[in-house]
Amino acid sequence: MKAYSVKELLEGNLLLQEVTVNGWVKTFRSNRFIALNDGSTLANIQCVVDFENFDQETLRQINTGAALKVSGTLTESQGRGQSFEIQVEEIFVHGGADPEAYPIQPKKHSLEFLREKAHLRVRTNTFAAIMRVRSALSFAIHQYFRQNGFYYFHAPIITGSDAEGAGEMFRVTTLSDKNPKLNDQGNVDYKEDFFGKETNLTVSGQLEAEAYAMALGKVYTFGPTFRAENSNTSRHLAEFWMIEPEMAFYDLDANMDLAEDFIKNVIGYVLENCADDLQFLEKRLLDEEKTKPQAERSEMALIEKLKFVTENGFKRVSYTEAIDILRNSKPNKKKKFQYAIDEWGADLQSEHERYLVEKHFKCPVILFDYPAKIKAFYMRLNEDGKTVRAMDILFPGIGEIVGGSQREERLDVLKDKMADLNIPEEELWWYLDLRKFGSAVHSGFGLGFERLVLFTTGMGNIRDVIPFPRTPQNAEF
Amino acid sequence: MKAYSVKELLEGNLLLQEVTVNGWVKTFRSNRFIALNDGSTLANIQCVVDFENFDQETLRQINTGAALKVSGTLTESQGRGQSFEIQVEEIFVHGGADPEAYPIQPKKHSLEFLREKAHLRVRTNTFAAIMRVRSALSFAIHQYFRQNGFYYFHAPIITGSDAEGAGEMFRVTTLSDKNPKLNDQGNVDYKEDFFGKETNLTVSGQLEAEAYAMALGKVYTFGPTFRAENSNTSRHLAEFWMIEPEMAFYDLDANMDLAEDFIKNVIGYVLENCADDLQFLEKRLLDEEKTKPQAERSEMALIEKLKFVTENGFKRVSYTEAIDILRNSKPNKKKKFQYAIDEWGADLQSEHERYLVEKHFKCPVILFDYPAKIKAFYMRLNEDGKTVRAMDILFPGIGEIVGGSQREERLDVLKDKMADLNIPEEELWWYLDLRKFGSAVHSGFGLGFERLVLFTTGMGNIRDVIPFPRTPQNAEF
């Protein structure tokens, strides 16, 4: 007999039919009510067992975590909290779960405890909900770009250069770990390595995406990127997924328009398609925040916050305006900022971004036209000669969720900038080619996927929104 | 004024309107006809210039590869081969392309030449078509799984173990390349490395996907995987993308059903959505094959071949049957195979797979129930004690495109197998946990994405279907 998913059973089209379902026991109450879940949806299907019809051995195995195949008639439920249930006729135990040994018991586990059990934590309601939302967001991203004329582009993961200079990189090698062959200069002879040169894991697919945008028009990447930074914070991962759209003929305004529309659209998709998971996560967050002092609790509940983002314009503020606001702000005057804002040109710290977003504007903010000195070499220089067409999107509780810019399309300006920063032209000959042949205004941005999942699920630690997090000293599983 | 894409202009809803379009010059004929392309579609828009209205300096810059903004009235075209054209009123040159220096001129370039220019080759019709098909296939994959109740799961890229033993791996490290600290045993002290242990790039996300399937039911990965094999062939990459679905409660038959339906569906999507690109690629292949002797040409044209796959059942053949067929085949009797098939238990080589698919059955073939000895440890042992519930899908011209199996769900059998192969239980404690707690029948497969793109586009070398290929001695760009 065809087996149905719990989701299908709860849709209501199978009433009074004989059905079969596979799943895992969430709870077994009174030797009579099995709550069975198969991951297809948050809700369980209640399976009603007449224990007199089943042998003790079978009943003994029906513990939390056991995998069962259950057959019976789907009926309307008399119980609270569910509309349908199965009057069980047959039970097959695929595999038991010894209650003494199985760590995921029906009680509250700390998120820290569950991180040690990353292979099992997705069996909890919380992590199943997070991962379903994560999956829905991924799909929404692909769908958005496809519907808007973008092509998905796979940037290389192993790269030959640290061109972006975005921080520490992981080396990728097949050389002997202990005694690599040295060259005449006494350095490691990378000619002997797999790729014949030193290679690293990518920190960004942007530069390669630019090459593709200058042919296909609008492209995006969605792939893993890596930072070997020794940051043990709730917002950093050594391995994370990033989305990087890149568009020919887009200036910074068009870039900001796209980024805002994109974020609203994908969050809107989740609001429409993950209502039950979001409700569950909203309740989880409320429960978690009950333990916090009033001042630290969120001003909005999760779903209200997501709707706020989709329904309101992001505030666009130039860096210069932002500096004025910060300089004159109460925390700056009262010296409450760790880094005081004295003058134009200062790099904004997390505390400043949070002040702007959470205290001053109380909405997502797009900051643009940053000082050239604090931004990357490829950003387009403004006519003032001191700012670049960069933009960052700042989100409440998250900080920077998007970083982007219009790219420098003028060969001479780009070369000057690279020379200033000692980036050798030979390293990026192909990137310069894009400015030699058919160059044009173009723009793009990067969005850290896990930060978006963090925001959308209301979770507090980035380790909890990716299946198997990689952080300093941790590459388990 | 809003700029339209070439694709939008060619849809025919803007006739007699003033339009603006950005793109790159493909050709400029008779100082009058600009063929402009922006990557949105294979076709160009013809822009008709009255050269008397434009200064010489502008006209001089209209060379192949130059980026232009063109405005004018969209009219019906009198010329052959296009339905619409722009009567040009304004031209803005974003960036020129010196014909002496720009390598992508309107003439035939060899695929080998273009591989050296991977940042520019996507500006050719061939590579733009391939990459649009690649993007469409990617979307079709995500859409298929989403519509069929699967959750997208991101497997970790950096892993702590070579559990699958699937070949050479790339080491990922931040240790000093020349003088890493050694431990008391005189070995490299990986406690000092970023993750506190030796780490590698993943060869497969399957084992982690199993953990997720045993909670969410049906999941799939779609991410990069790596093999540090020194194979310089037209079918191997060091970095490639793989799709790995994993389903709880699926046996091998359900697994084969899914794999076949999946492949047919995604190829069907491309047939529906990429008709012009496929026609172009079909013609390219025909031209290429004209230089080959009749016997080496494809029996079907590209689109016919794709339709054949979507419209016909894949032939399912047990390994034992396949060995019988091969043993009694002409090439085996005439000793034409490099590796003669003498007895049951032999591993099939590419020449045998091709014989089965291309000569004997002349259709995609699913081989199943392989000898346990030639397959991985995690495949489910059959009751005969000598075969496992493995399956490979073989495609004409490609060979193995899918490899999958029902997974061993019995803890004791799995442990015995691991002991036989000297795989330490401590390495895979978490994988064994999946058999301790709520174990059940489950299955999955892996599909090499680039091989699917190869098949779908009719290209002959895997380096030509990924934007920036990584192969031994090559990690440019």
Image (tube, coloured by chain):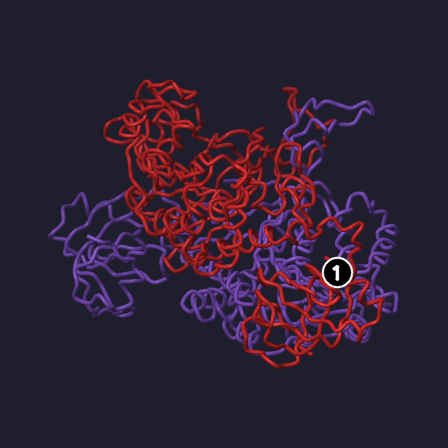
Chain colours: A red, B purple
In which image quadrant can residue A52 be found? bottom right
In this picture, residue B184 sits left or right of residue B253: right
Query: In terms of depth relative to the viewer, which is nearer, B147 or B75?
Result: B147
Residue A327 in view in this figure: yes
Q: Which residue is outermost to the left?
A: B53
| Residue B73 percent location from the top left of the image | 16, 61
Eyeballing the image, is B468 above or below A181?
below
Eyeballing the image, is A393 above or below B69?
above
Secondary structure, mark 1, is loop
Eyeballing the image, is A231 above or below B370?
above
In which image quadrant can residue B437 be found? bottom right
Image quarter (top left, top right, bottom left or bottom right) of the C terminus of chain A: top right
Query: In terms of depth relative to the viewer, which is nearer, B429 or B376?
Result: B429
| Residue B238 percent location from the top left of the image | 62, 47
Residue drawn at (67%, 61%), measured in percent from left and top?
Answer: B445
What residue sits right under mark 1 in the picture?
A: A66
| Residue A393 percent location from the top left of the image | 37, 39
Q: What is the chain identity of the residue bearing mark 1?
A: A
In which image quadrant can residue B454 be found? bottom right
Image quarter (top left, top right, bottom left or bottom right) of the N terminus of chain A: bottom right
Residue B333 in view in this figure: no
| Residue B70 percent location from the top left of the image | 21, 53
**Three-letter code, disc 1:** Ala
- Number of residues whose C-alpha sits closer than 10 Å to that of mark 1, classed few (under 14), some (14–19) or many (20 or more): many
In this picture, residue A188 sits left or right of residue A318: right
Residue drawn at (58%, 66%), measured in percent from left and top?
Answer: A80
Query: In terms of depth relative to the viewer, which is nearer, B205 or B239?
Result: B205
Eyeballing the image, is B182 above or below B382?
above
Residue drawn at (57%, 40%), measured in percent from left and top?
Answer: A239
